[in-house]
Image (spheres, rainbow, N blue to C red):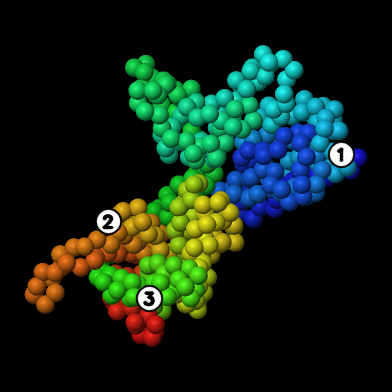
Amino acid sequence: MAIIDVVVPQLSESISEASLLEWKKKVGEAVTQDETLIEVETDKVVLEVPAPASGVLTEIAQGDGSTVTSGQLLAKIDTEAKSGAAAPEAAAAAAAQPAAAEPAKAEAAPAKAAEASKGSAGVASPAASKILSEKGIAAGDVEGTGRDGRVTKADAAGASAKPAAQAAAPAAATLSLDGRPEQRVPMTRLRARIAERLIQSQQENAILTTFNEVNMKAVIDLRNAYKDRFEKEHGVKLGFMSFFVKAAVAALKKYPLLNASVDGKDIIYHGYFDIGIAVSSPRGLVVPIIRNADQLSFAEIEKTIAEYGVKAREGKISLEDLTGGTFSISNGGVFGSMLSTPIINPPQSAILGVHATKDRPVVENGQVVIRPINFLAMSYDHRIIDGREAVLGLVAMKEALEDPQRLLLEL
């Protein structure tokens, strides 16, 4: 017998602990090298724990939802055993596992099997609970395909609310006396961290927001004229975000304080432009970084954004992707937002909020005309950025977008 330990991967220095989501294998099942066994959720990303070698999973040391730290033992794999041959050892190991990690083995008696499945029916993994909570669906209303009927992340993603006439009282809900259901769901580590950072930002920064409007007609016309050739040439669609990134970089070069950060009583001026792009994921908002954005072409920026979008949807954003950043852009327009006041992402000192472009009446040369208008909002840390720099910086972004050829000529 050759036993190999499966341990928690090394977490970054800023992360002290993490939570286990859901085991994808049961004790006694065969695993192949590099196959994902479980996902570990930190307050920033979800890390996959692969099998270090092929063999049979003989022990699960920590169950679903357990809090773990770097290097902690998660499971053991027998590299010389074969699935089925290791059943006695697996059964013995299973008996010693925590309740949350108990393998779902077939019971000899149907009554026992029914009793076992009843234990986890209506119970959702942390990731699934978040998705269901956002959809307003109780875990008890979803048929789980996980161990003992547990609701998995995939189950939650595909679930839809029942019609009101058919909906039963949610099993996991706390019913008030008048029959109105409530459900208490713990925050995921990421959501708790987002909440903590937002409060920290508002408490530690003197946040002010300045607004302006931009006529997007020139950008829209340029994009329409070249989007097909652009996609054919570069293999990626020409979106609007690359224009906003380029416009932001142009403004940051003119007004370096917008690209600076505060460290104690010092101001750090960054000689590079790492732009954070707020991206929604099933776990919440993440802000991956486009590094050296000033050195990238429109195509390179669009490719980077597209890659981050895929990573976010698949839960594969890494710590490295989220580390750093000197300025951020948040695009609420993709959800239809007309106007908002974005919150600064510490330790940055400014953030640009982009909104939905809508046809609006504007005055040009004394005439009322209809133009595609986008309201821009830039929040800034008034401790180091005065209104002059903030307003002029946003005006510089507006001017670059209204005359996008300037971005190509760096004017």
Q: In this view, does 110 lie above or below 82?
A: above
Q: Distance between the residues labelled 1 and 3?
A: 59 Å
Looking at the image, which is closer to me, 75 or 379? 75
Q: Please say if the residues under marks 1 and 2 sit with CB atoms less than 8 Å apart.
A: no
Q: Which residue is drawn at 82% across and 43% down?
A: 55
Q: Earlier in the sequence, mark 1 or mark 3?
A: 1
Q: What element carries label 1?
A: loop
Can residue 257 be seen here? no
Looking at the image, which is closer to me, 211 or 78? 78
Task: Determine which of the numbered discs, if any, sits on residue 287 in the image.
Answer: none
Task: Write down the quadrant of residue 227 in the picture.
Answer: bottom left
Which residue lies under the disc numbered 3?
Answer: 226
Which residue lies under the disc numbered 2?
Answer: 338
Other-residue count near label 2 (Cα within 10 Å), few / some / many at <14 / 14–19 / ≥20: some
Q: Is residue 319 above or below residue 384?
A: above
Can residue 55 be seen here? yes
The three-letter amino acid code for the residue at tag 1 is: Ala
The three-letter amino acid code for the residue at tag 3 is: Tyr
| Residue 162 position within the rendered picture, expressed as x and y whole percent measured from the top left | 40, 29
Q: Earlier in the sequence, mark 3 or mark 2?
A: 3
Which residue lies under the disc numbered 1?
Answer: 81
Number of the front mark, 1 or 2: 1
Q: How far apart are marks 1 and 2 (CA)?
A: 60 Å
Q: Which residue is drawn at 63% across and 18% down?
A: 114
| Residue 148 position within the rendered picture, expressed as x and y whole percent measured from the top left | 63, 26
Q: Is mark 2 on a helix, strand or loop?
A: loop
| Residue 274 position within the rendered picture, expressed as x and y whole percent measured from the top left | 49, 70
Q: Please say if the residues under marks 3 and 2 sit with CB atoms less than 8 Å apart.
A: no
